[in-house]
Image (spheres, rainbow, N blue to C red):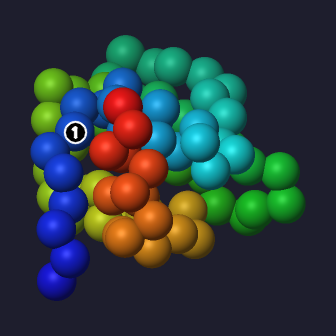
Amino acid sequence: MSYLPRLSGKEAVKVFERFGWEVVRRRSSHIIMVKEGHMATLSVPDHKEVAQGTLRSLIRSAGITVAEFTEASKEL
């Protein structure tokens, strides 16, 4: 399995924004994101650290690879 960085919810949102995802609303504990032409929505937990399994699931739903996500997260 590929390495995944430890990110907060806000940091993960910044990475997904680099791939064209947009924040549509913020709830008390989750940030909802959408992308034009994509059926799925992403519900990113607004926690100090997003669980590794949750992050992998979000990456899969976003239609990107772990390697692409990891590379984009290095630029934070």
Tag 1 residue: 7
- In the picture, which quadrant includes the C terminus? top left
Residue 40's x, y, as percent?
64, 61
User: Is residue 2 in sight in this rendering?
Assistant: yes
Specify whether 47 is left or right of 55: left
Specify whether 59 is left or right of 5: right
Tell me which amino acid carries mark 1. Leu
Which residue appears at 20% of the width and 60% of the height? 4
Residue 55's x, y, as percent?
29, 56
**Residue lying furthest right:** 37
> Is 56 placed above or below 20 here?
below
| Closest to the observer, 11 or 27 | 11
Which residue appears at 15% of the width and 26% of the height? 48
> Is 59 placed above or below 32 here?
below
Which residue appears at 59% of the width and 42% of the height? 18
> Is 19 placed above or below 29 here?
below
User: Is residue 61 in sight in this rendering?
Assistant: no
